[in-house]
Amino acid sequence: MANNLSIRHLRAFIAVAQHGSFTRAAEHLHVTQSSLTATIKQLEQQTGLILLDRTTRRVLLNQEGERFLPVAERLLSDFDTAVGDLQAVAAYQHGKVGIAVSPSTLSCLLPPVIKEFHSLYPHISLLLRDDSAAGIEQHVLANHVDFGIGGNHSEQPELSYFPLLRDRYGVVLAPDHPLAQQQGAIAWQELKHEKLLMLSTDTGIRAQLSRNPAGHGIELVLAHPSIEVSNPAGLAALIDTGLGLSILPALAAGTHSFEQLRFRPLDHPAIYRDLYIIHRLGRSLSPAADVMLQLVRQKFSKMILPPFVEAI
């Protein structure tokens, strides 16, 4: 059984076959001729076959050697390609980084980070998946991405959550709404008699709101929304028509869908959403993914953030 064959044996055999000489093959491989001869002898002992016919002037492949040569060349080529790919990844010359991220973070905060990453590592491709908080966790758990940026939706024990940002919840309303005219924060009590339009219960934003402690009129405001919508763009359109108002975190309210609307922070009490870098425990990051993660942390900690958003 050829249990101890190695890449070294394949290189030696291919070099001798190509050069037809132990002397020239040894020079090509930068080894001594005696070392090369010993390596070929080991190969033939392991296979149980003579692969080369030696004459006084030349070394030739016999029938078994000719049959083995293309197999050896293919194995060596695959090995060299695989090692080259690994070295390219280590040198940031090749690879892909996958990130699952909330739509608001992708549109409001990530573009300058992505631009800098591509200027530093132009050969690394990025795969960005925008999804809900639950979807982000599932992408990370399924290894569809290297890490995620989103809320702690379900405290999965297989995931680590590194705090990154915090944004404040507020009221989103049409510019001509009476509450839009007042300055400063709006108290929850002021929303008791307003028509509430909310994202549906399967979204991370709605799930977090439902977990907030009762009191200060919060439960009365959230108990019976007039309309529930699964898509933020549809929610913005309904608010713009004057059908009612909604409650969103500042980043979500800062996306393009809501740019014609007004945002007022909520108070008494103020409620916040925390965003995390989410990574699967026990899974190491590729060099490129680790660089991207560190760049996200660095840039987010130093960038000028939108109102009511802060680094943590």
Image (cartoon, rainbow, N blue to C red):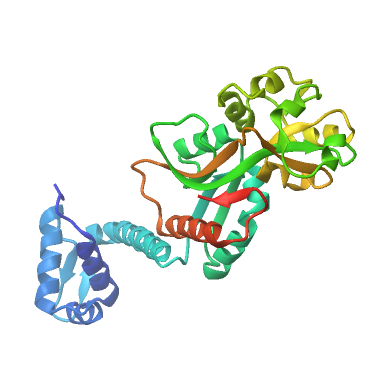
Q: Position of residue 36 (x, y in %)?
A: 14, 72
Residue toward you, 298 or 70: 298
- Residue 289: horizontal and vertical position, in percent? 46, 55
Q: Position of residue 12 (x, y in %)?
A: 21, 69
* Position above or below: 250 against 12: above
Question: In the visual, does 282 lie left or right of 247?
Answer: left
Q: Residue at x 72, y 42 (%)?
A: 253
91 sits left or right of 239 in the view: left
Q: Which picture quadrant has residue 183?
A: top right
Q: Is residue 229 visible?
A: no
Q: Is residue 185 above or below residue 202?
A: below
Whether residue 30 is visible to the viewer of this picture, yes or no, is yes
Classify residue 210 by image quadrant.
Answer: top right
Q: Note whether 94 is above or below 188 in the view shown.
A: below
Q: Is residue 108 left or right of residue 45?
A: right
Q: Measuring from the top left, give residue 277's x and y in whole percent.
A: 48, 46
Q: Nearer the viewer, residue 283 or 244?
A: 244
- Residue at image x 80%, y 34%? 234
